[in-house]
Image (tube, helix red, strand yellow):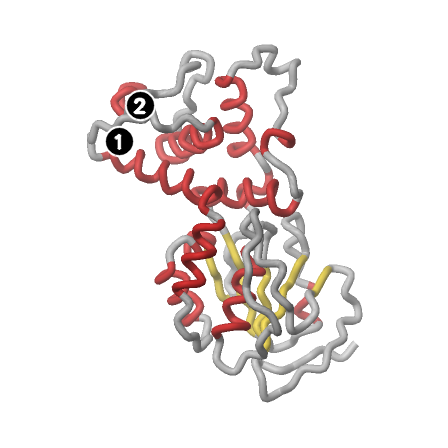
């Protein structure tokens, strides 16, 4: 197979969760000299942007051979969809000399990926996918479900996957949650972009339920570190509570005793006393 050797191809290599499709849409619509999609960018109820027309076919693991007639005078964004379980880079054989943007995540952004993986990729819910095992949790109370979610976040193999390498441009999931960080990161990848802040705001709003538990936990940890008393009675969602427990474990190396704290913390002072 003869690889495509144009240097004006940007391969978006991404884990599942809709991140790659959004970046592809940004480059295709706002990138200088990129071939434009034929329809508008619309976000679904789950926050996906899959409805937008892709100007070139997505590369899948089974895309062999990959066939598309590229115009050497234009820029292109190509989605590299291996699935979240496969970081294989066989696609490089198809797109020699292309620029690669690898979308990565860290411990602190893993909860965003974890939930989008379930809701977007699996088209399911955490309630359906993370069901209590009665052999391990004979008690069906909220604390048991909180522990189940926490252990999923802590122990899942994918938590430590999709790390940066020394070859490709890196775009962190964290960058996507802040417009300026996202814009600057794409610029550093060598892409000339027009402003897309209004579209980013729409994307952020459509994906808030994945992002806000992480931002909320970061704010709570900030208050804990700075001895600021904060009421936590407004955090009633069990997933959000589990994300905070996960952040406590990441930051302080302490696992909250789930049964002992069957009632979720009412304020940050209680967490400080535990730590």
Which quadrant, please, contains the C terminus? top left
Category of crowding for the residue at label 1, using alpha-carbon neighbours closer than 10 angstroms: few (below 14), some (14–19), many (at least 20):
some
Residue 271 disc label: 2
Residue at point 69%, 79% (across, down): 4
Q: Is residue 66 placed above or below 247 in the rendered structure?
A: below
Q: Is residue 69 placed above or below 180 in the rendered structure?
A: below
Residue at point 67%, 72% (across, down): 56
Q: Position of residue 42 (x, y in %)?
A: 55, 60
* Mark 1 lies on residue: 224
User: Relative to the observer, which residue lies in front, 224 or 43?
Assistant: 43
Q: Are circles 2 and 1 on residues that touch, CB within 8 Å?
A: yes
Lower sequence index among marks 2 and 1: 1
Which quadrant, please, contains the N terminus? bottom right
Category of crowding for the residue at label 2, using alpha-carbon neighbours closer than 10 angstroms: few (below 14), some (14–19), many (at least 20):
some
Give the structural element (helix, strand or loop) at label 1. Answer: helix
Q: Is residue 257 placed above or below 87 in the rendered structure?
A: above
Q: Position of residue 62 (x, y in %)?
A: 78, 61
User: Relative to the observer, which residue lies in front, 9 or 124?
Assistant: 124
Q: Position of residue 244 (x, y in %)?
A: 40, 31
């Amino acid at each position: 197979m003869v690889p495509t050797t144009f240097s004006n191809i940007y391969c978006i290599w991404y884990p599942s969760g809709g991140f790659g499709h959004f970046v592809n849409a940004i480059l295709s619509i706002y990138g200088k000299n990129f071939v434009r999609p034929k329809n508008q960018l619309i976000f679904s109820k789950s926050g996906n942007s899959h409805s937008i027309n892709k100007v070139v076919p997505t590369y899948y693991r089974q895309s062999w051979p990959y066939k598309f007639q590229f115009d050497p005078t234009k820029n292109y964004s190509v989605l590299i969809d291996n699935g979240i379980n496969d970081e294989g880079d066989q696609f490089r054989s198809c797109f020699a000399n292309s620029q690669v943007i690898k979308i990565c995540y860290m411990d602190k952004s893993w909860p965003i990926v974890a939930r989008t993986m379930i809701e977007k990729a699996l088209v399911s819910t955490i309630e359906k996918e993370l069901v209590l095992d009665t052999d391990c949790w004979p008690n069906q109370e909220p604390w048991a479900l909180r522990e189940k979610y926490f252990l999923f976040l802590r122990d899942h193999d994918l938590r430590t996957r999709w790390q940066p390498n020394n070859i490709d441009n890196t775009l962190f999931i964290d960058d996507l949650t802040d417009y300026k960080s996202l814009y600057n990161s794409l610029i550093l990848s060598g892409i000339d972009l027009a402003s897309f802040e209004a579209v980013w705001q729409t994307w952020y709003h459509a994906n808030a339920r994945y992002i806000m538990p992480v931002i909320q936990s970061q704010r709570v940890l900030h208050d804990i570190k700075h001895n600021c008393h904060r009421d936590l009675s407004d955090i009633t969602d069990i997933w959000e509570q589990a994300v905070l427990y996960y952040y406590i474990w990441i930051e302080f190396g302490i696992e909250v005793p789930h049964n002992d704290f069957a009632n979720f913390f009412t304020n940050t002072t209680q967490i400080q006393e535990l730590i």
